[in-house]
Image (cartoon, helix red, strand yellow):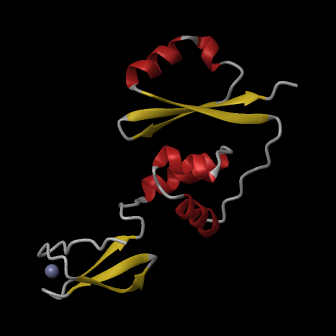
Amino acid sequence: MKYPLCPRCENHHVVKSGVVNERQRYCCKKCNYYFSVDKIGKSIDSYYVTKALQLYIEGISYREIERILGVSHVSVMNWVRKYKVKAPEQRQYHPTYKILNHTELLEHLRKSDNLKGAGTIITELGDKYMMIKWKRFKE
Ligand SMILES: [Zn+2]
């Protein structure tokens, strides 16, 4: 694992110094500055936690959530456990999702048929939008 640079002096002589609130803590050997970094090396704010849990409830698998949001499936599993989220069992519907830019999204929404017979949620995702639709399994 690559250690981060010290945010204060940009020195790379950094050592691990315990874990605090599920974040790896480091200590800079040069300036003695303590700092912590999220374990997956990317800041995870509640934005991603909320999105991940939302997708989880919608029936999207851990691996898919990892692919969509770029946060590890292990983190997602931890959040599900931490917030005690339970997804309802789904047999009759399954979710499909699309990542669209703004123009594509508007184009899609223009046709009312695209919104019929499927529960649709739209959620912002970086500079794009994700649209989740529920489709009834063909029997
Ligand atoms: Zn330093």
121 shown above or below 113: below
13 shown above or below 103: below
Q: Nearer the viewer, residue 116 or 134?
A: 134
Ligand 1: give its quadrant.
bottom left
Quarter holding the C terminus is top right
Residue 64 percent across, percent down from the top left: 58, 46
8 shown above or below 130: below
Query: Quarter-wise, where is residue 116 in the image?
Result: top right
Query: Quarter-wise, where is residue 74 in the image?
Result: bottom right
Residue 13 percent across, percent down from the top left: 20, 82
Residue 24 percent across, percent down from the top left: 38, 78
Residue 119 percent across, percent down from the top left: 67, 29
125 shown above or below 43: above
- Please indicate whether residue 83 sits to the left or right of residue 12 in the image: right
Which residue is rendered at x = 40% and y = 26% of the image? 101
Which residue is rendered at x = 41% and y = 82% of the image? 20
Which residue is rendered at x = 40% and y = 33% of the image? 128
- Please indicate whether residue 59 sits to the left or right of residue 4 in the image: right
